[in-house]
Amino acid sequence: MSSQKSELPIHTKHTPADDQHRKVSLNLDPYAPAEVYYGDSHSPRKVGGKGRTYSAIEPKGTVAAFKVPGRRTSHDAQGNAPRRFLCDVDETLKTLLMREDTDHNIQITIDDHGPKTIQLGTAASGGYRHFDVRGTYMLSNLLQELTLAKWYGRKQIVLDESRLNENPVNRFARLIKDQFWPNLTRRIDGGNIAAVATDPKDWSKDPHPRMYIPRGAPEQFQYYTRIARQHPEMRLEVNYLSEDPSNEEYVRDLNEAPGLLAVAMERIADTPEGEPDFKGLPFVVPGGRFNELYGWDSYMETLGLLVNDREDLCESMVKHFCFCIRHYGKILNANRTYYLCRSQPPFLTDMALRVYDRIKHKPHALQFLKDAILAAIKDYYGTWMSAPRYDPVSGLSRYVPGGLGVPPETESTHFIHVLKPYADKHGITHDEFVHAYNYGHVVEPELDEYFLHDRAVRESGHDTSYRLERVAAHLATIDLNSLLYKIECDIARTIRAFFNDKLDIPAEWQSPGQKNVEVSSTWDRRAKKRRLIMDKLMWNEEKGMYFDYNTVKKEQTGYESATTFWAMWAGVATPQQAQAMVQKALPRFEVHGGLVSGTEESRGPVGLSRPNRQWDYPFGWAPQQILAWTGFMRYGYDEEAQRLAYRWLFMCTKAFVDFNGVVVEKYNVTQQISPHKVTAEYGNQGSDFKGVATEGFGWVNASYVYGLQIVTAHMKRALGAVTPWDTFQRMVQGDPLAAQEAFEPPMHVHVAAHVQEAAKLKHDEIFHDARAHAHEHDGNGHEHNGHPVPGDLHELHGHEALQHSNESTKGHQATYGDSEHEHHASLAPGESYIHPGQAEYSKA
């Protein structure tokens, strides 16, 4: 094995500087990442210098370092210098939680009934003068900052007020870039294999880390074998996979000893003993509890990572997918052995082209693109255009993964309600029946059909939904076939633009029966054929939307799903169809927080015997929003895209402000107060944290920074003031009462009668002035467009109009950033890829 020569390029070992190690600044940015603000800037090596801890500023523990004012001034007096607070971390944290965390969940939210105020000593006075920090938002930010400081071992800190009253949109976006992405980044190599290879879903009698290596990567087998030999305490088991790793019987047998699948690595300098050494390429996981590379989550995350200039992570994830297709035959649901037969929605060509557009100046960029297109072609033939996923009668494709028996990644009791009648029928226990059924000792055709569709639902990524339940494997879905149309178009354009209309296919990338040369015209014809079939079988002119097609019943399902807009994202729809979708379909899905996954009518009634499914009404998911925004902009419906993006961003921001910075996997988009509180099926990932949310959730993080590229600067300012869409729209249209009517008194706070009266007088004064102004501008005394039109109120958005919709926070001095980030989203020359501020309709 030692004679094997690695084909991976050799890279020198990284130094701390290569890992973006930041230099310590003595004039610290108040918005610096936590590891700089509380970490590097407080390094013990810097104590003798100018630090930011109380003890570091004066090693003897006195307050001499702080200049006390010559005389006491007004409590509210403030100069031009930014206010900073002097905080004892443990004491302030204890006091804050005791006063404000009334439900004892280590979060400060609008559900808590505390006084919503705490006094902090100012750093300029050495803690002598105090200032009130008020309101849920600032108090929850204080809790988050204190929690971070404690994690970094700080006892006393000087805290900038600007970290507490920061514009929530800016804070949300900053945390995504500086904190969430780094905390969701993983790599797999000897440095962490004991942790990442341990599987919480390993139900075997002796769970321990196992690593499975494909036959085509002998250098990784040699590497991990060396790691296991050097660290016997890990109990790391290293195995080669079969030559046919997706064989159903083989995968079933692996379930007795499940493990982690190898992904791409880079060669680094040899060990001191002269042995080849490697380092895992980084990737981003969906949520904090995951360690695996996931399929379509990675694509959605790429969209946000590119906004934040992390094309290095995106490039690595594309390379991982190419590795999986080359060695496992497909992009896997995730890199665990029990997913070897299952894929996920394919986005590789779009993902690779977006990344290429950002790295095209690099020498290896064209080879990177070529490898990705070769991998996509192999995946197209071997996965989506082969049995059982391809339906030769309709010419469309379906989610039909292989597999035998009960899906092993679920807990043993997950299907107990389904399996119990069969176990009782055979007079054996639940566990005995599962084993007998998995190995074919008992035959139950009805159960086979049930699990066929269950696996298909999981491969679709939409697990679960009544749209797909007990029928998924029979459906040619609009989402999958839109993706395949997009892949066909992407491959055609790329071959034509980058490879002189002729792409040679090396043997290692060929599928059985595939030609060794690909030309663009072949892929153009495939795309046109698929679009014609989709128009014939899936388009419904009366409803103005696409429906899934049942290949067994040979009819449309009629289930109204937001996946219909994927046809616009992919460019399947004609301009006339796109117009019909905007006019007829969009109103059926647009709700308070953006797009709902499906309509309530299609979902049907729910209750104890028919519980709600998480991909149905009333829930909304980031992928549906992102693809719809891009699709609408592709056809020139920029206003609709901006409106939908605003609704989603507002909902996410409102939850972030009101609930201690929470960012979750999915939202109840019909709920205005607490959209993150979702209990359907698996609950909600990302809401269970103590003190501070450190990861968010992958594709929601991406949707937020991606959506901010779509909305206007005016909209960003309104979002920063947490202004609902309806209020913002009315103010833009010149309604002077919008801001007054949108105001809600702080929850759990008594509003005195004289304050209510003053508010009513102000309301009446504005209304009277507005009507008088309208008469001045209209000789007949009529109101314009049904609203008074005072000129100054057309621009009412920065002071009175954009009040916090739920809680007025004293001292909240938000600053609104209008900076626009460049959005890179290009395909190949020949197709203008739609990005914010640009819209073009392009068809094959």
Image (cartoon, grey):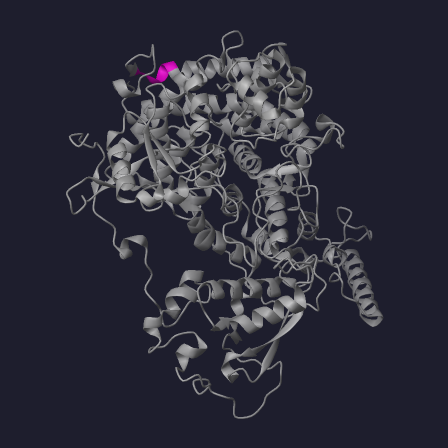
**Residue 754, located in which quarter of the rendered image?**
bottom right
Q: Where is residue 79 shown, x and y percent of the image?
A: 53, 80
* 66 left or right of 371 in image: right
Q: Is residue 527 above or below residue 343?
A: above
* 675 left or right of 823 in image: right
Q: Give yes or no for residue 34 being in the magenta stretch.
A: no
Residue at 76% x, 62% y is 748
Number of dots carrying numbers: 0
Magenta segment boundaries in residue numbering: 518-522
Residue at 65% x, 68% y is 98
Residue 809 seen by the camera: no
Residue furthest top in the image: 393
* 203 left or right of 751 in image: left
Q: Where is residue 562 shown, x and y percent of the image?
A: 61, 30
- Majority secondary structure in the magenta region: helix
Foreground pick, 266 / 242: 242
Q: Where is residue 326 shown, x and y percent of the image?
A: 33, 25
* 130 left or right of 263 in image: right
Q: Is residue 505 above or below residue 362?
A: above
Which corner quadrant holds the N terminus?
A: top left
Foreground pick, 95 / 763: 95
**Residue 49, located in which quarter of the rendered image?**
bottom left
Residue at 36% x, 77% y is 50
Q: Where is residue 490 shown, x and y percent of the image?
A: 40, 25
**Residue 456, located in which quarter of the rendered image?**
top right
Residue furthest bottom in the image: 70
Residue 228 seen by the camera: yes
Which corner quadrant holds the C terminus?
A: top left
Residue at 60% x, 10% y is 552
Q: Is residue 50 above or below residue 828?
A: below
